[in-house]
Image: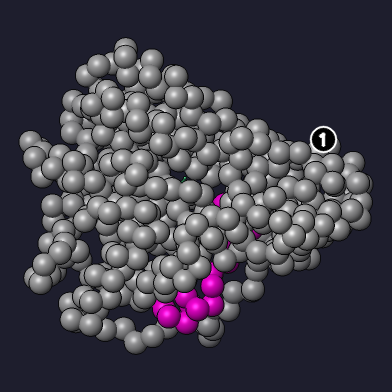
């Protein structure tokens, strides 16, 4: 049997990630592989740390990409900061808060859960109550942008409350980084992890993290060894840490890092605030189009993520059939609901490079056609025009 090269189709990725990768990034990744201790590569790593600090709006020295996907960034935060016997307050309002709980328990610690309904923001009052009831808690963890539901939480306020109770803060910024305002140093978030395949529009497989000096001292003063050898920052820093000497820890994913470097250069060129604004503008146009069609959002306007639109599936519509038809006829991928929201919502991503006018109009036009053909109860033929008008009024103000 003769095996042939794999040639994936070209899709438009408007789900919960990965998002469309900027061709500049794919081109950067195809450049020559060099040694991971080559001085030229080491210079690139130093520049990447600076670019990451810009994207995170962080001035923390320990800022670097973990060589594995967002979930590994999550584990890096938990295994390094949580010690056996600790008490950690975990805010959950979707899938990823549940994974935080798993992480806490696997570190031999106790998770105190603060739960909010899926599709709503974390309630700061509930966090305050939980911390008053648990004065021995050492850490607070929450998801800034819940990709499973499309809701954003007030990271600044949650961090303020946590610090008032002498807790460090772990924040999941996988979907918020570069898509929604995120100011790590100003908000004093202590350990933040992200991913490359959401609003950075890079290929999946890396997880930028940033740790405050306070968090680094906790890691350095641990009584017990970090349970994961690979993710132990005390060891990883021998490679990624500052100073001239780099010791081999693991072979860095060289070409993947070229890609992330390019992605971060692109963010820097655009400007981080301009990137946030572009995500907002495209979301607004999509929203106007969807609402003109008669579709509604699953999340209240105040907590809506611009980069992840959770849209209620109209009654009687076959969720999977619509997504299949979008993929087959329009090469367009949108996301399904997760957990309790499965079958109830679609998750339409407008992340990074994919947050653009072409995608908004394609998605509205394709949904209009597919839902119309299936006899769904929508207003046909108005969505694209409504979105175009929204763009026009944006340009005018
Ligand atoms: C995607 C995502 C993750 C996990 O990232 P992977 O790269 O899939 O491991 C974690 N948290 C949130 C909020 C995410 O959206």
**Percent of width and height locating residue 104:** 30, 33
Residue 244 appears left or right of 95: left
Q: Which picture quadrant has residue 78?
A: top left
Residue at horizontal 18%, vertical 30%?
Answer: 84
In the figure, is residue 25 to the left or right of 254?
A: right
Q: Which residue is mark 1?
A: 315
Residue 206 vs 31, above or below: the answer is above
Q: Between residues 258 and 384, which one lies in front from this camera angle?
A: 384
**Relative horizontal placement of residue 267, taking residue 367 as reference (left or right):** left
Q: How many marks?
A: 1
In this view, the residue in front, 58 or 335, is 58
Name the residue furthest top.
133
Is ligand 1 within 8 Å of the beta carbon of the residue shown at mark 1?
no
| Residue 372 percent coordinates (x, y) | 90, 51
Q: x, y (%) of residue 164?
A: 28, 25
Residue at 40% across / 31% down in the picture? 158
Question: Residue 24 lies in magenta, yes or no?
Answer: yes
Q: Position of residue 330 (x, y in %)?
A: 76, 66
Mark yes or no: residue 317 visible. no
- Corner quadrant of residue 291: top right
Q: Nearer the viewer, residue 4 or 51?
A: 51
Determine whether, in the image, residue 206 is placed left or right of residue 198. Answer: left
Badge 1 element: loop
Q: Split into 4 quadrants, where in the image is the C terminus?
A: bottom right
Q: Which residues are magenta?
A: 13-29
Q: Where 83 sits versus 47, above or below?
A: above
């Amino acid at each position: 049997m003769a095996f042939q090269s794999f040639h994936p189709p070209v899709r438009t990725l408007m789900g919960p990630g990965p998002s469309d990768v900027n061709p500049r990034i794919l081109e950067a990744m195809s450049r020559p592989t060099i040694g991971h201790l080559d001085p030229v590569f080491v210079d690139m790593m130093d520049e990447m740390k600076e670019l990451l600090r810009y994207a995170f709006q962080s001035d923390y020295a320990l800022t670097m990409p973990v060589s594995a996907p967002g979930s590994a960034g999550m584990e890096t935060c938990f295994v390094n900061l949580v010690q056996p016997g600790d008490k950690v307050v975990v805010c959950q309002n979707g899938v990823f808060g549940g994974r935080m709980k798993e992480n806490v328990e696997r570190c031999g610690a106790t998770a105190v859960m603060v739960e909010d309904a899926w599709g709503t923001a974390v309630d700061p009052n509930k966090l305050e109550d939980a911390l008053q009831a648990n004065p021995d808690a050492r850490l607070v963890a929450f998801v800034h942008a819940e990709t499973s539901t499309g809701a954003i939480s007030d990271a600044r306020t949650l961090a303020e409350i946590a610090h008032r109770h002498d807790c460090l803060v772990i924040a999941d910024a996988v979907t918020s980084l570069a898509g929604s305002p995120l100011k790590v140093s100003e908000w004093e978030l202590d350990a933040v992890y992200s991913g490359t395949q959401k609003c950075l529009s890079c290929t999946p497989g890396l997880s930028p993290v940033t740790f405050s000096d306070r968090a680094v001292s906790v890691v350095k003063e641990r009584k017990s060894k970090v349970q994961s050898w690979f993710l132990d920052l005390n060891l990883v820093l021998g490679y990624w840490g500052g100073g001239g000497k780099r010791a081999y820890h693991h072979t860095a994913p060289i070409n993947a890092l070229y890609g992330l470097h390019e992605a971060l250069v692109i963010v820097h060129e655009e400007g981080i605030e301009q990137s946030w604004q572009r995500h907002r503008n495209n979301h607004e146009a999509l929203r106007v189009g969807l609402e003109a069609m008669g579709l509604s959002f699953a999340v209240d306007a105040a907590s809506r993520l611009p980069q992840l639109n959770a849209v209620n599936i109209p009654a009687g519509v076959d969720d999977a059939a619509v997504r299949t038809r979008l993929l087959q006829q329009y090469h367009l991928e949108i996301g399904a609901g997760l957990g309790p929201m499965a079958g109830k919502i679609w998750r339409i991503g407008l992340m990074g490079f994919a947050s653009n006018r072409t995608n908004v109009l394609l998605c509205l036009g394709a949904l209009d056609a597919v839902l119309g053909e299936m006899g769904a109860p929508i207003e046909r033929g108005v969505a694209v025009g409504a979105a175009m008008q929204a763009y026009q009024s944006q340009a005018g103000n």
